[in-house]
Image: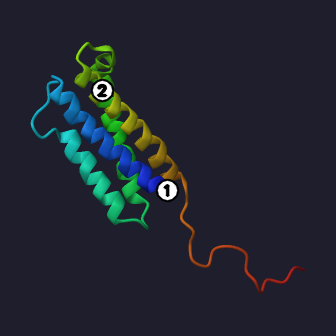
Amino acid sequence: MNLRGAAVLGLVAATIGIYVARAGGAPAPIVPPAAVLMVVAAVLLAVFRTRTWPAVVTVVVALAEAAGVVATGSLGNLAFAEPLLGAGTALRVVGVLAVLIAGTMLVARRPARAGAGPREREVAP
């Protein structure tokens, strides 16, 4: 699996984690804004395969989701007695971490430009 696929899989896993945690009792709207943002980022990443900007959007969305997990105290749900709540939170955290790692590597990797590299006809002095 390539980095782009890993980032998309992480976004999907984190989105599923939101709904699993919601089924376990986490307070969330029916359509959480984080889930919408992650689905949009996954679609952008899958559609615009030759561009770098979707990877940047993906990393920003993952950072926002990570900040949301920490700010809301959702990490405390990992040791919660409700199995669905803990499993959903774990899936959400693992998905976000996967997105942050794969997305950051995608952004850091520079795409090869046509014509880049040493010239074949260059003569050394």
Q: Residues within 10 Å of mark 1 (few under 14, many from 20)?
A: few
Residue 66 image point, x, y percent: 35, 32
Query: What whole-number distance in Å separates the C-alpha atoms at marks 2 and 1?
Result: 26 Å
Q: Residues within 10 Å of mark 2 (few under 14, many from 20)?
A: many
At x 32%, y 37%, the residue is: 64
Q: Amino acid at mark 2?
A: Ala
Callout 2 secondary element? helix
| Label 2 sits on residue | 87
At x 23%, y 34%, the residue is: 18
> Between residues 5 and 48, which one lies in front from this camera angle?
5
> Between residues 41 and 80, which one lies in front from this camera angle?
80
Q: Amino acid at mark 1?
A: Asn
16 over 46 or under it: above or below = above
Q: Is residue 19 left or right of residue 106?
A: left
Q: Earlier in the sequence, mark 2 or mark 1?
A: 1
113 over 2 or under it: above or below = below
| Label 1 sits on residue | 2
4 over 88 or under it: above or below = below
Callout 1 secondary element? loop
Residue 89 image point, x, y percent: 30, 27
Which residue is farthest bottom? Answer: 121
Residue 63 image point, x, y percent: 37, 38
Q: Quadrant of residue 5?
A: bottom left
